[in-house]
Amino acid sequence: MASTATKGLTKAQIGKFRQQLEDKDKEIRASLETSRAGKALIGEQTQNLEDLPVQAHEEWIFLNRNSIDASLLREVEEALERIEEGSYGECMDCDEPISTKRLEAIPWARYCISCQEELAAIEADSRLAENKPRF
Ligand SMILES: [Zn+2]
C-alpha cells in the first residue's frame, strides 16, 4: 500500500470506522423502511388536510425526518467508498487529515472542522433565503 493512502489513520482505526459506518448504514435503511411504511399509512388517513391540522403537521415531520435520513445515508455510503479508495479521513476541501476525535464523533465527516464551519455558515445563509413559509 502506498503511504499516501489514509493519512494518519491506522488500519485498525479504519476498520473500526468502517464497522461504525456499516452499522449506521443498516440503521438508516431500517429507519427509512419504517418511515416509508408510516408515510403511506398517514397519507391514507389525511385526505382532508384542513380537517386534520395535527396529523398534517405530523406528516410534515415524518417527511422532513425522512429526507434527513436519506441524505445521511448518502454521506455514510460516500464515507464507505472513501475507505475503499483510501482517501478516508481527509478533508474533501483542503485535503488536510480530519482529526480522529472528529471522526469518532462523526465517522462520515467529509470535511475538517474549519471547512465544515465555513460550509455550515454558507448553508445557513442559503437556507434562510430559501425558507419561505409553507402554510
Ligand atoms: Zn478542510
Image (cartoon, rainbow, N blue to C red):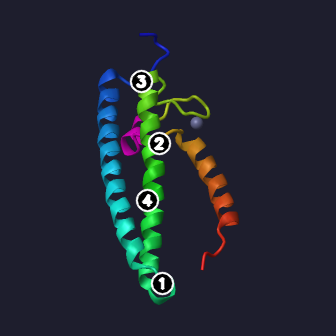
Looking at the image, residue 59 sits to the left or right of residue 127; the answer is left
Q: Earlier in the sequence, mark 4 or mark 2?
A: 4
* Residue 23 position (above or below residue 82): below
Q: Secondary structure at mark 4?
A: helix
Range covered by the magenta-colored residues: 100-109
Q: Main secondary structure of the magenta part?
A: helix
Q: Earlier in the sequence, mark 1 or mark 2?
A: 1
- Is the C terminus in the top left, top right, bottom left or bottom right quadrant? bottom right
- Disc 2 marks a residue whose amino acid type is Glu
Between marks 3 and 1, how big is the CA–CA gap? 49 Å
Q: Is residue 124 magenta?
A: no
- What numbered label is drawn on residue 75? 2
Q: Which residue is mark 3?
A: 84
Q: Secondary structure at mark 2?
A: helix
Instruction: Report whether the residue tagged 1 is closer than 8 Å to ligand 1.
Output: no
Residue most toward the top? 1
